[in-house]
């Protein structure tokens, strides 16, 4: 389901995605729908993906994706619907193939699809564990992997993935969901590394928004957190002017904040003394002290920091070879 040229009016100087093609998963409702509509408003042609199931992933209904497409078309945009499941490799490949068949290219992937099957760990059924990780983590990876070759060929691409405060900070009763969402952060950082030489960026958002998955948790406070307040960050991260990569942002209600993984300066056992459990207990305050904490950009930075704390010399030279390889030296 598609239309021709855009008739959306945008303010002079606004971000222009004309000519770009975006895939948005889970775009039949809530955040994904808001993302798809705003990307289209800024000129992108959009593949709207949604299986149309319940919040637990059960069922299949083409209506939600079709309604999002209709709203985009009525606003003067271009869009088509896809109801494949991102939790399967075949489904992920199909939605990429559909986008290519309809629009001829893929520039932007917004991984947003998600379900909930909450339970405390001792009550968590294996099927519920696999289902949640399948949609959130594997779905993100399957869609990204299917789209990546086309971005590499074009030497351009923008990935925006969706994590959660539950994945970053933890939340009672959501071990399956939190594990999947934390995995997305690590995945995005690796994808950013691997895509850098091809002009591909990868970033993550942790949205605070009122959706089908959160309305029972947020209660009355959800009125402050409309999904539409999240999508402007997605549009920026999906734009050519944005060169940020490997980043994670908390976003909701008009607030946007960088989220980082930091490391304390730590404590080093005296030379020759070795490390014992008793010494750990005695120096716990120093180990836990976050004053002067660092924010490593990548794994090599953290390793170098630890080695320098241990008195190693020439750390940059020993670790720098990998980071300093030219594109022609790097493996594909």
Image (cartoon, grey):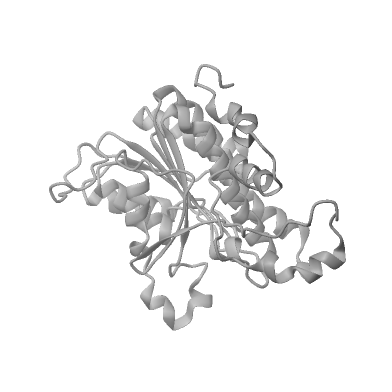
At horizontal 25% and vertical 42% (from top left) the residue drawn is 43
From what the image shows, is residue 173 above or below residue 146? below
Q: Nearer the viewer, residue 88 or 119?
A: 119
At horizontal 68% and vertical 67% (from top left) the residue drawn is 286
Q: Quadrant of residue 200?
A: top left
Q: Quadrant of residue 1?
A: top left
Locate residue 89, reporting x and y percent: 61, 37
From what the image shows, is residue 122 above or below residue 221? above
Q: Nearer the viewer, residue 300 or 165?
A: 300
Left or right of 244: which side holds 195?
A: right
So how many labels did they put on this image? 0
At horizontal 16% and vertical 49% (from top left) the residue drawn is 10
Can residue 29 be seen here? The reply is: no
Can residue 81 be seen here? The reply is: yes
Locate residue 159, reporting x and y percent: 45, 42
From what the image shows, is residue 330 above or below residue 108? above
Left or right of 6: which side holds 236?
A: right
Locate residue 75, reporting x and y percent: 22, 51
Furthest residue toward front: 271
């Amino acid at each position: 389901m598609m239309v021709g040229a855009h008739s959306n009016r945008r303010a002079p100087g606004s971000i222009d995605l004309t000519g770009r093609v975006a895939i948005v998963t889970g775009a039949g409702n809530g955040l994904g729908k808001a993302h798809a509509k705003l990307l289209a408003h800024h000129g992108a042609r959009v593949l709207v993906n949604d299986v149309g199931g319940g919040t637990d992933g059960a069922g299949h209904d083409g209506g939600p994706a079709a309604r999002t497409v209709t709203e985009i078309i009525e606003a003067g945009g271009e869009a088509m619907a896809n109801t494949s499941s991102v939790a399967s490799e075949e489904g992920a490949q199909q939605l990429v193939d559909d986008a290519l068949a309809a629009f001829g290219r893929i520039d932007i992937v917004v991984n947003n699809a998600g379900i909930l099957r909450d339970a405390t760990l001792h009550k968590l059924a294996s099927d519920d564990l696999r289902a949640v990780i399948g949609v959130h983590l594997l779905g993100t990876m399957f869609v990204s992997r299917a789209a990546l070759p086309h971005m590499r060929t074009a030497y351009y691409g923008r990935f925006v993935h969706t994590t959660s405060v539950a994945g970053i900070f933890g939340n009672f009763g959501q071990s399956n969901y939190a594990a999947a969402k934390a995995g997305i952060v690590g995945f995005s950082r690796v994808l950013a590394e691997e895509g850098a030489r091809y002009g591909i960026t990868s970033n993550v958002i942790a949205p605070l928004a009122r959706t089908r998955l959160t309305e029972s948790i947020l209660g009355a406070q959800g009125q402050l957190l409309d999904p539409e307040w999240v999508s402007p960050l997605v549009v920026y991260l999906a734009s050519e002017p944005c060169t940020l990569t490997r980043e994670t942002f908390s976003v909701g209600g008009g607030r946007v904040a960088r989220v980082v993984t930091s490391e304390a300066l730590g404590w080093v056992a005296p030379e020759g003394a070795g490390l014992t459990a008793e010494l750990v207990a005695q120096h716990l305050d120093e180990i836990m002290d976050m004053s002067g904490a660092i924010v490593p950009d990548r794994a090599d930075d953290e390793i170098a920091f630890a080695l320098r704390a241990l008195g190693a010399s020439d750390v940059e030279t020993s670790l720098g070879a990998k980071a300093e390889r030219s594109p022609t030296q790097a493996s594909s």
